[in-house]
Image (cartoon, grey):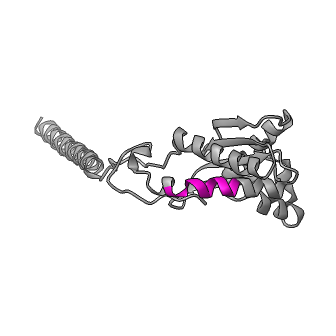
Amino acid sequence: MKEKLQNSNIYWSCGFIILLIFSALGVFSLSSTTNTVKAINNQTVPTVLNTHQVLPLGLAQQLATATQTYCKDKGYSVTISVLNRDGVDILLARGDGTTGATVEVARQKAYAAAGFQSPTSAMEERAKTANPGIIAIDRFAVLPGGLPIKAGGELVGGIGVSGAPSGTIDEQCAKAGLAAIASSLSNTNTSNRTNINNNSSGIKAG
């Protein structure tokens, strides 16, 4: 009888010890989980959204008008496409007497210039030598006459010109248009950003 009681006491003691061990493990696990949650909650979470410059419609209209005027003074009627940084139309200005084909060509020049952030004349040279695959990209016209529009080194859009006797003249018209609005762009404030912050930057056409 005494032996049974002793065995029973041993079993109870062992069970109690095991229970204490599991309880300790549970407390440790809960403490570890709580600490992990606290660590996550204490991590610094950025509260400022990324911002980017936006080319306002008014300046895009001035750009198109200046470009048209330059080409018209040279005796050429052209179509002008101005796209935003994502390749979406801001405006399209088709000169009197231009053919329907100039519409898509101008848009595709602007799209290529914005997409590669490079003048399309430079891309044409690359296509001839280092990267001929450029000409196969959908919606890209790798012909002179497309220029990226940049604000403080940041891309804001692209302009494409089509309709002059040569792509070189198309590009000259685009450059003249950008030069005409350069001062207006440089004076644009941060209200033309998608999100307003306190960091202003100068804007220039490039």
Residue 59 lies in quadrant: top right
Instruction: Say if residue 54 shows up in the picture.
Output: yes
Is residue 106 toward the left or the right of residue 50 in the image? right
Q: Position of residue 188 (x, y in %)?
A: 44, 51
Instruction: Say if residue 144 shows up in the picture.
Output: no
| Residue that protrudes farthest toward the bottom in the picture | 129
| Residue 116 in the image: above or below residue 60 | below
Is residue 47 rendered magenta in the image?
A: no
The main secondary structure of the magenta stretch is helix
Q: Position of residue 91 (x, y in %)?
A: 64, 36
Where, quadrant-wise, is the C terminus in this rendering? Answer: bottom right
Residue 122 lies in quadrant: bottom right
Q: Position of residue 153 (x, y in %)?
A: 54, 61
Q: Which residues are magenta?
A: 174-183
Is residue 176 rendered magenta in the image?
A: yes
Where, quadrant-wise, is the N terminus in this rendering? Answer: top left
Residue depicted at 83% across the width and 35% down the height: 97
Is residue 12 toward the left or the right of residue 47 in the image? left
Is residue 92 toward the left or the right of residue 132 in the image? left
